[in-house]
Image (cartoon, helix red, strand yellow):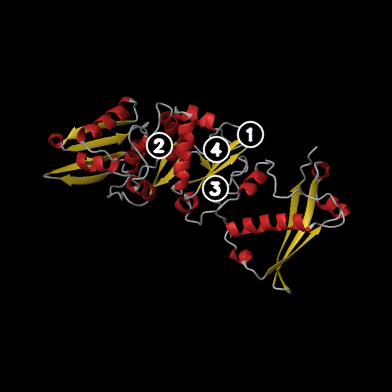
Amino acid sequence: MSVYQLEIKQLVDYPRCRIYREFVQSLIADRNIRTSGGSGLFYYTVLSCYANFRTSYKRLGSINYIIFPGEWLCKIDELSSLLRVNSKRQTISILTDLQDRHLITFTILGNGSLVKFKINGWDTFNRVFEYNAPCQKDTGFFFLPISVASEIIGTRRPSEMDILLDLWLNTVYCDERVEGSMLGPVVYMRNCSGNPLVSYDYLARRWNMSKATVGRYLKKLKGLGYISLTNFSGTKGSVIYLQKYLSTMFRISDVILDKEEIAMALNINVELDDSVSNSDISVSKLNTDAVVRKVRQILTAQGFSCFECRNLRHILLKLSDCKRKDILRNDLLSLGHTRYRLLFYCGDHRRIAAFDVTVKNIFRR
């Protein structure tokens, strides 16, 4: 009997992104994020959210309308509310703009009170069902093509909501080809480097705005709990992780990441509070406190609350050179790595965890 194992991933070369309708509904309801004056990515996403997967029938007034896959029919006032605009004129202007860019086609019906639109190329990225049945609009998901989203975001300066969707669509999770993606859902702009570090200068050019505006928008999204932003000194850049991605996409708990943990995954040197001793005989109290404090912070951030307990005891032992040679590669040893064995005890007797910790030494002249 075959055994199957489910792997939760979002791969970098997958040409489309799964978008849950509940997520789009939450964005529509979040009035803290501005939508006006953008590139149209948010508007295109909302229209795609309400498009049919199969043929259905809808009765409005005395007329029965046939709605095919990729289409939807509704009152203009209803669509205005979904697009978060205040007038029929603004709604028609948005639809006309998307139609001129060959993203949708639309028709005004019912003496000007109804609108029927169709997502162009819908069946290319979304499965079309042959049978006829009503289509749910508040549950399930649809696929949004990455290529179309990138084309939309590059046309003009995006809104705050467009930027959030751009980050969401360019997120990678558990893909070994992208550094840092094994820790959590990381934003990767598909530059073929495999490194998610991104500069404000690049984002300013991508979004057609100043670096100061980029920083302000990212800071706002961080404050609203949508992203985790880690900035590194010099010209290294920044790393953006999404906060609500795992719970929305895969129905699993979101992760909390530590800056040093991210730096380790990206091979970036981040200084600890105290330098590492070069002694091969003992571990100083300063070095012990620095290593243990950092390990406890990382484990606590990952949800292991017992590492906050006052009764927790620890022992930090430096591994000898001969033992380290059996464990570590020779090239790591030549770079000045120090290996520790860290033991945690509950009280004075029961051991609850043991870790091998590698610290990279940074020598100053």
Graded by Cα atoms within 10 Å as few (under 14), some (14 to 19) or many (20 or more), the crowding at tag 2 reads many
Label 4 crowd (10 A; few <14 / some 14-19 / many >=20): many
Q: Where in the figure is residue 255, as x and y percent of width and height? A: 54, 53
Residue 155 position (above or below residue 214): above
Which element type, helix, strand or loop, lies under badge 3? Answer: loop
Q: Is residue 177 visible?
A: yes
Q: Residues within 10 Å of mark 3 (few under 14, many from 20)?
A: some
Q: Amino acid at mark 2?
A: Asp
Query: What's the residue type where badge 1 is placed?
Result: Gly
Q: Which residue is mark 1?
A: 234
Q: Are marks 3 and 2 in contact (CB under 8 Å)?
A: no
- The tag earlier along the polypeptide, 2 or 1, is 2
Query: The disc labelled 3 sits on which kind of residue?
Result: Lys
Q: Which residue is mark 4?
A: 188
Between the C-alphas of marks 3 and 2, the distance is: 24 Å
Alpha-carbon span between mark 2 and mark 1: 28 Å
183 to the left or right of 70: right
User: Which residue corresponds to mark 3?
Assistant: 9
Q: Is residue 65 left or right of residue 7?
A: left
In the picture of the structure, the residue carrying the numbered disc 2 is: 162
Rounded to the nearest angstrom, the CA distance separating label 4 from label 1 is: 20 Å
Q: Is residue 75 left or right of residue 174?
A: left
Mark 4 or 1, nearer chain start: 4
